[in-house]
Image: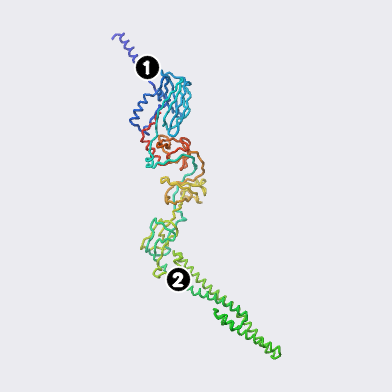
C-alpha cells in the first residue's frame, strides 16, 4: 500500500467514527432532572403480559424529557410528572411538528385528573422552557387524565389513564373478608401516658367460702364456672359441732318459755290488782267487792288486801257507833277512844298493805322480766352462733320442727351473686372450719391494677380519665382512676393505681394484661381515622377509600395518635368512606392486581 492509499484509508476511518458519534448525539436522552413518565415498583405490584406490551408501546412515545408525547397537526406536547427534590408537578414541553420550541405564552393548557372520588383541575403557566402545573400531583398517581390545549385558534384534546393501588372488590367478597367501612370525620385526640396493667377481681365482690366448722362433705352442688345467687346452696356437710349448737339453742328456747309465761301472768296480776285497788277506793261493801273481783287473777294480793279491808270496814263501823253514843252521853269516853284507836290502826295497816302490794307486784314483774331478758339474750347469742355457722333465720326459727337425725346436716351457702372461680371440695373428704372450699366472684365489674412509675406520678390523679385496651382481643373500656397508693415499692419504684371498669359481657378476664392510657388532655381535630385502618404501601401510610365497588389507597400525612384515633393532616377529606376493619384484606387484593405506577 502506497502513502496516498494510506491517507485515504485514514480519512475514511475518521469519517466513520464521526458519523457514529453524530448519530448517537441525535438520539433523545432522559434528563437527569426529569422523572420518566412512569415508574414501576416491582416489589409492590406485578405486571400482566398485556401491561408489558402496553408499556413497550408507550416507550416508543417517550419524549426527550422522559414524558408522554401527544401530537396532532402541527402541535406536539410532552407531558411529564417531575418529582426530583420537589413535590410531584406537571411539566409540559411544547414544540411544533419540526421539533422547534413554541413560545409558551401562545399556548393555553388545562389538565383534569379524574380520580375515584373527585376531579383535580390543573392550570398551567410558562416557567422557563416548559409549562408548569399550579398544583401538586398528590399520590397515588391513579387517575384518568384529560388534556385540553389551545394554539393558533385551534383546540386539541387528548386523554389517557394510569391506575395504581386500586382494586375492585364486590360487596359479597368484602362481606366475606370482613371488610367494613365508615365515614371519615372529626374526633377527639387524647394526650395520654401509656402504662401496663393487669385485670384483677373486684375485691368488694369476692367471697372466700369457708365451712366455719369441722365437717364431712356429703354432697357438692356447684362446680367451676357455675353462676350462683346469694343464698344458693353450694355443698351439704355433716357436722357434730353443728348438732350440739342446735341442741343448745333449742334448750335455751325451752327454758325461756316458762319465764315468759310468768312475766305475762305477773303483768296480768299487776293490772288486775290495780283494778281491785280502784274498786276499794269506792268503799263498797264486801259482797259487792267480791262480786267485782271474783273473776280476776290477783295472786296473793287478794288474800292480803281483802281481810285488811274487811277489818277496816268493821273498825270504822264500831268507831262511828261509839262516837254517836259518846256524843249522846250513853257510852264512856274510854270506850270511844278505844274504838277510834282500833279504827285508825286498821286504816293505817290497810294503807300500808296497799302500798306494799303495789310495790311487791312491780318488783316481782321487774324480776321476772330480768329473767326473761337473760333467757332471750341466751337465745339470741346461740342464734347468732348458728348464723355464724351459716344457718338462715328461717332455718333457726324452724329448728323445733326439724328431725333430730338432721341436726348434723349443714348447707354451705353463697354469700354473694356471682360465679364459682375456684373449688377445693369433693364428696367424702373432711374439711376444716377455716379452709376456703370455694372462691366466688361477681365479674360484672373488675379492677385494672396499674404500676405507675415514679417519673409519671405527677401525671396521675384520682378521678383522672383512663382508657383500657386489650389490643389483640379488640377490647376497649373507659373508667376513672379510683385509687392511687401512698407507698412506693422499693424494688420496682412504682405506685399501685387502680381503675374500675364494667364487665357485663365477661370479656375482661382476671389475669389479662392490658394497656392503660392515662388521659392528660384532649383536643378536637377536624379529621381522624382508626389506627386499624392504616396500612403501609411502599413508604406511604395509607387508608383505602371506597367508591362503589372500587377501593384505592390514599397516602396520609398523620398527626397525633392516642391509640384509639389517629389525626389526619392531609390525604383524606371529611365524609370520605374508608375501610376501618380488615384493611389488610384490601391491601392483599391490591397486591394481587396488575396496577402499576406510571407517569
Question: Is residue 64 found left or right of 345 in the rendered image?
Answer: left
Please state which of residues 420 and 112 is positioned toward the viewer in this rendering.
112
Q: Nearer the viewer, mark 2 or mark 1?
A: 2
In percent of width and height, residue 121 lies at 46, 29
Quarter placement of the C terminus: top left
Quarter placement of the N terminus: top left
On residue 250, the disc is: 2
In percent of width and height, residue 166 lies at 39, 34
Asked if one can make out residue 496 in the rendered structure from this viewpoint, the answer is no
Q: Quadrant of residue 49 in the image?
A: top left
Give the secondary structure at mark 2: helix
On residue 563, the disc is: none
Give the secondary structure at mark 1: helix
Give the residue at mark 1: 22
In percent of width and height, residue 233 lies at 41, 61
Lower position in the chain sequence, tag 2 or tag 1 = 1
Q: Quadrant of residue 11 in the image?
A: top left
Q: CA distance from mark 2 to mark 1?
A: 128 Å
Placement of 492 over or under 35, stated as above or below = below
- Give the farthest residue toward the front: 154
Amino acid at each position: 500500500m502506497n502513502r496516498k492509499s494510506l491517507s485515504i484509508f485514514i480519512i475514511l476511518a475518521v469519517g466513520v467514527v464521526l458519523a457514529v458519534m453524530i448519530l448517537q448525539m441525535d438520539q433523545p436522552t432522559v434528563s437527569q432532572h426529569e422523572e420518566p413518565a412512569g415508574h414501576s415498583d416491582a416489589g409492590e405490584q406485578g405486571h400482566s403480559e398485556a401491561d408489558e406490551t402496553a408499556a413497550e408501546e408507550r416507550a416508543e412515545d417517550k419524549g426527550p424529557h422522559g414524558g408522554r408525547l401527544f401530537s396532532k397537526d402541527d402541535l406536539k406536547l410532552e407531558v411529564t410528572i417531575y418529582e426530583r427534590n420537589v413535590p410531584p408537578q406537571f411539566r409540559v414541553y411544547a414544540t411544533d411538528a419540526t421539533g422547534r420550541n413554541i413560545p409558551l405564552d401562545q399556548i393555553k393548557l388545562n389538565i383534569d385528573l379524574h380520580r375515584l372520588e373527585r376531579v383535580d383541575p390543573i392550570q398551567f403557566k410558562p416557567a422557563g422552557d416548559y409549562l408548569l402545573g399550579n398544583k401538586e400531583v398528590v399520590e397515588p398517581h391513579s387517575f384518568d387524565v384529560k388534556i385540553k390545549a389551545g394554539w393558533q385558534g385551534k383546540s386539541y384534546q387528548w386523554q389517557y389513564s394510569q391506575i395504581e393501588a386500586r382494586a375492585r372488590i364486590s360487596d359479597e367478597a368484602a362481606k366475606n373478608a370482613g371488610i367494613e367501612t365508615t365515614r371519615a370525620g372529626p374526633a377527639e385526640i387524647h394526650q395520654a401516658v401509656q402504662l401496663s396493667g393487669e385485670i384483677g377481681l373486684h375485691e368488694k365482690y369476692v367471697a372466700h367460702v369457708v365451712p366455719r366448722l369441722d365437717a364431712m362433705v356429703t354432697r357438692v352442688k356447684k362446680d367451676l364456672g357455675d353462676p350462683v345467687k346469694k343464698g344458693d346452696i353450694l355443698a351439704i356437710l355433716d357436722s357434730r359441732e353443728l348438732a350440739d349448737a342446735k341442741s343448745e339453742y333449742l334448750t335455751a328456747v325451752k327454758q325461756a318459755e316458762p319465764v315468759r309465761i310468768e312475766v305475762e301472768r305477773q303483768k296480768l296480776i299487776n293490772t288486775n290488782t290495780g283494778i281491785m285497788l280502784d274498786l276499794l277506793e269506792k268503799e263498797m261493801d264486801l259482797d259487792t267487792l267480791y262480786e267485782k273481783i271474783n273473776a280476776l287473777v290477783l295472786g296473793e294480793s287478794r288474800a292480803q288486801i281483802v281481810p285488811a279491808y274487811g277489818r277496816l270496814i268493821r273498825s270504822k263501823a264500831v268507831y262511828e257507833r261509839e262516837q254517836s253514843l259518846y256524843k249522846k252521853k250513853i257510852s264512856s269516853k274510854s270506850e270511844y277512844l278505844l274504838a277510834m284507836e282500833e279504827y285508825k290502826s286498821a286504816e293505817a295497816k290497810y294503807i300500808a298493805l296497799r302500798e306494799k302490794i303495789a310495790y311487791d307486784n312491780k318488783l316481782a314483774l321487774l324480776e321476772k322480766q330480768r329473767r326473761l331478758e337473760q333467757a332471750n339474750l341466751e337465745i339470741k347469742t346461740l342464734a347468732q352462733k348458728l348464723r355464724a355457722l351459716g344457718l338462715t333465720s328461717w332455718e333457726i326459727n324452724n329448728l323445733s320442727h326439724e328431725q333430730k337425725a338432721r341436726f348434723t346436716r349443714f348447707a354451705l351457702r353463697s354469700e354473694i351473686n356471682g360465679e364459682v372461680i375456684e373449688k377445693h371440695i369433693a364428696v367424702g373428704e373432711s374439711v376444716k372450719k377455716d379452709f376456703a372450699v370455694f372462691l366466688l366472684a361477681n365479674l360484672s365489674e373488675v379492677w385494672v391494677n396499674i404500676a405507675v412509675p415514679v417519673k409519671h406520678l405527677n401525671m396521675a390523679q384520682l378521678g383522672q380519665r383512663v382508657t383500657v385496651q386489650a389490643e389483640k382481643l379488640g377490647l376497649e373500656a373507659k373508667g376513672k382512676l379510683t385509687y392511687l397508693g401512698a407507698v412506693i415499692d422499693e424494688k420496682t419504684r412504682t405506685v399501685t393505681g387502680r381503675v374500675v371498669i364494667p364487665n357485663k359481657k365477661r370479656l375482661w378476664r382476671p389475669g389479662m394484661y392490658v394497656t392503660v392510657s392515662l388521659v392528660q388532655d384532649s383536643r378536637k381535630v377536624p379529621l381522624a381515622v382508626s389506627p386499624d385502618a392504616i396500612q403501609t404501601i411502599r413508604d406511604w401510610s395509607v387508608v383505602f377509600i371506597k367508591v362503589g365497588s372500587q377501593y384505592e389507597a390514599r397516602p396520609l400525612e398523620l398527626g397525633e395518635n392516642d391509640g384509639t384515633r389517629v389525626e389526619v393532616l392531609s390525604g383524606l377529606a371529611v365524609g370520605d368512606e374508608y375501610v376501618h376493619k380488615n384493611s389488610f384484606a384490601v391491601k392483599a387484593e391490591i397486591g394481587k392486581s396488575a396496577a402499576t405506577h406510571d407517569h
